[in-house]
Every structure is written in structure tokens, then in C-alpha cells.
Amino acid sequence: MPDVGSSRRATTSVASTVAVLLVATVAASGTERTNYTGTPVSAEDGTEVLRFSGIRFAEAPVGEWRWRAPRPVARTDSDVPVDATNWPPACMQDDGNVEWYQGVAAAFGQSPDVAPSLPETTEDCLFLNVWTPDTEARLPVMVWIHGGANVNGWSFEPNYRGRELAAMGAVVVSIQYRLGVFGFLAHAALGAESAHGSSGNYGILDQIEALRWVRANIARFGGDPGNVTVFGESAGAGDIAYLLLSPLADGVFHRAISQSGGWPADQRRTLAENEAQGVDFLERAGVSNVAELRALPAASLLDLADEHFKRGYDDPPVDGWLLPAPPADLLARKAFESRPVMLGFNADEMLMYVTPTAERWQQALAEVPRADAVDELLSGLSIPERLDELASGGQFTCPSIALADGFAAAGAPTYVYRFDRIRPGEHGIGAYHGAEIPYVFDSHDAWLPTDEDDRRLTRRMMGYWLSFAATGNPNHDESPAWPRWGDDMPIQTLSSEIRPVRAVRSVTKVMSSMD
């Protein structure tokens, strides 16, 4: 699929037309008067889409504003259009997401050179991108929150570009948010600066601020601010679970799609636990207070964080504000705004990450209850497959089912999928973590083996995602019926054949299998 970034830039005449369209819409809406110049790009079917790249949605979180809540972007009344034709810098991070692409490429026998390079990174990174087929329409809006363990990722990775979805009738937005130590450092001194006594949740607050910007401005791009769906994968999907449960996100979106992000169902990390990590971090940095930490260069902080934080993933703490209580408690009490939810997981989420040895299998068994039952349940599988089933079941399958149960019990229309498609060829990583993304965006890399089954599944999955964004129900005329989650626990399997299967809760509550 051609890289959107390689598409021709707008000519002066087209750019002027785009600016005039936006000025006219802004004048009618009476909102912020900033005007933007975008880039026309052509979808595979020839549909012209306008792309606006690098739109600022919050002021730079630098200097004294490092580790504070995001500030709304300052209003401007200039008639000079802002150039929105270039990708923004990414948020501060290391090469973690690049290494993921390289790992997938290696599994398919490809050179690491086919992976994207890490773009320029900076703390001043609170930008978003918009793809729209019609600035004068009122289309459903889909806001993408990227993955990367909340320590990596950027809004315009090749797999995440919204051109093809937009061409099918949506306004697509992709956002950035502070990562790692910049987005999730907690410390009592930072909490004391907050009117809510909270810290360590800045990345999630960035996402909420971006959604507020969308609510206030997306009509100017042809989107319906009353019909906004958030969707994301991995950490982005986990963050969406927190957004669904946070009172701070009430009213800023209306539906949610969570792709491989179930673990917040088990999240109970407290603010005190994360603040204790912050104390240790200050000691490692050799500073005595937060003011001195704010004075350190961003690159130094990134290096220190890589050495200090070993969990590999950053969650917001249960702070009594962003998260009033642990997610499981909020679900049990139905203490959240009920919205339609579509969520799922991949069949082999952890296969590419496990150490496939018999010794590791015995170590893994020692860490779970009823190890004999688990060993018997999985005895017909290879060692790598057993480890994958155990890890994927504990981190993705079972928590996803718990989330589905909680949302459905609160009355939210809920739909659950399992992505099963394994690409052609011998690569040994199955339906791996992140494998579904190219099918959602129609962004299959040229080096990935792709056949007609993949293309057919892409059309069907895009139809499900777009239908859900438009109506809160994924069903549409061109794909098999998708039953709503309920007592019979139907899971829609997405592969060459699409059909519902019934989830089976395991005896250990760590494993799930399908019949």
C-alpha cells in the first residue's frame, strides 16, 4: 500500500481552496478561528482525502509544565492558515516500537531495514492528525490511540494512517500523548501541585484533552462531534478501558473499540505505589526535588527511565480522581458512563515474546494456581504454544472477557472478537500481537505476504469497525452477523472464515479456550 507520506503535497491552488473551506466552516461554527492547510491524498479506490498533519491540541508541556495537566491550545484569530502538511515530531521515547516492527519483519524473513525509523522526538509533542473525505459533511469520527506500552509509539506509524478508513466515510484522527517517565511519573510533590492531589496520569490527561479538542473543532473537518469513537491497540486499547471508566472522560466520546487491551480489569496499582517509584527515581537522578528534576534535559530523563523503570508498561494509578477506584470495583458497581463497546484479542498475542523451552514452561506452571489442570488442558500443544496460551490467557483473553462482562452488565451494547488470521507462509508467530492492525486500516506492508483471503478479511473488518463507529453496532450487510455479548458469551472469530464461537471459562480463571 503506498505510503501516505509520499503523496504529493497540495499545490498552492488546492491549499488555498482547503483554507477557504475551513475558514467558511469556522465562521459558521463560531469556534476557534485557526485555519489549516492540508494535503490531498488519494485512496486506493481513487477517493480524494484531505490530510491535516501535526495540528497542535495542547500547549507544549515543557519547563515548568513538565508533569502538569495539559493546557488547551491558545486561541488564535489569525487569518493566515497554519501549515498542516508535515508530520509532527513524536513524543520522547526509545526504539521500542521500531524493534517490534523489526521482530515481525525477521519472523517473515525480511531485513530489519524494512521497519520504519524512529522520527524526531521531543517533549513538545501534543499534536494530532486528521483525515477527512469531505470538510462540509457530518461524518462519524474515529480517534486512534496508538500502542507501545505507554512508553513508545507515535501517531503516524505506517500501520496507523487513516486514509483508507476516511475514504469509506469517516473522519479519522490520530493523537499523541506523553509517554514513559514524561507521561506517567508519580511523586507526592507533583500531587501537591495538583488541585486533585494526583500525579502519574499525564499521558491519559493528554488523551482527554485531545478528545476535548476534537469535540470543539472536528465539525470544521466534516466530523460529527456528537458521534466520536475512540479506538486503539495494546496500550492504546488499555488506555481506552481507563477512559471508559474515568469520570473525566464523560461526554468526550460516545463509543469505544479496544484491540488487545484487557488487562486494566486487573489493575490495582495505587497512587502511593507509583509515588514510591517516583521517590526512587529522584534518588537515581541525583536530585533532591521536583524543581531540579524539571531542569534536567529530556534526553537525560529518558536514559534514566530506561535504567530505572523495569515493568515495561506504564499504567495510570488508582488515584481517586482519574480513576476513582480500581477498574474491577468500578465495573462491579456499574460506576461509569455506559457506552457501546467493541473489544477483542488475537489468538497468539504472546507467541512472538515467549522463551520456548521446557524449563520455562515448568517455571510458568509454578506461577499459576491448579498447575496440574493447566498442564493437562494444554498437553496437546507444543511448548511455545503452551506458553503463549498461558501468557495470552492471563494478559489478554481472560481480562478482556472480564471487561466485556462488566460493560455488558451495565447495559452497554458489547461485542467481542478474536482475531485468528495467520498470514501465508512459515513464520512461527501465528496471529501475533498487533497482527489485526493492517486489516483495520488497510495498511498491509509490501513485505508482508498478503493474499485474497487477507484482502477479503480487510474489507469485512473495515466494514465492522466503520459500522460500529457510525451506529454502535458492527453489523452490516456485507459481512456475517456478529452477535452481541451476553450469557452465551459469543466471540466473533475473524479469519478466512468469520463465525461466532462460544467462550469457555477455564477452571483456573487464568486460562480461556474456545469450543
Image (tube, helix red, strand yellow):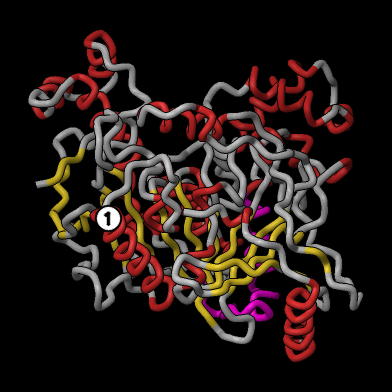
Could you tell me which residue is drawn at 56 percent across and 36 percent down? 314
Could you tell me which residue is drawn at 67 percent across and 24 percent down? 305
Could you tell me which residue is drawn at 56 percent across and 76 percent down? 133
- Location of residue 45 with respect to 2 vertically, above or below: below
Asked whether 307 falls inside the magenta stretch, the response is: no
Q: Position of residue 11 (x, y in %)?
A: 75, 70
Answer with the quarter of the image where residue 53 lies. Answer: bottom right
- Location of residue 457 with respect to 25 vertically, above or below: above
Crowding at dot 1, Cα within 10 Å, few <14 / some 14-19 / many 20+, comes out as: many
- Secondary structure mostly seen in magenta is helix
Closer-to-camera residue (12/68): 12
Q: Position of residue 236 (x, y in %)?
A: 51, 49
Closer-to-camera residue (412/255): 255
Could you tell me which residue is drawn at 37 percent across and 27 percent down? 109
Amino acid carrying label 1: it is Tyr
Q: Is 443 situated left or right of 82 in this image?
A: left
Q: Is 79 situated left or right of 166 in this image?
A: right
- Location of residue 432 with respect to 30 vertically, above or below: above
Query: Which residues lie in the magenta part?
Result: 204-229
Asked whether 213 falls inside the magenta stretch, the response is: yes
Closer-to-camera residue (322/354): 354
What SS does tag 1 mark?
strand
- Location of residue 325 with respect to 57 vertically, above or below: above
Q: Position of residue 213 (x, y in %)?
A: 69, 68
Q: Position of residue 271 (x, y in %)?
A: 61, 37
Q: Which residue is mark 1?
A: 417
Closer-to-camera residue (307/85): 85
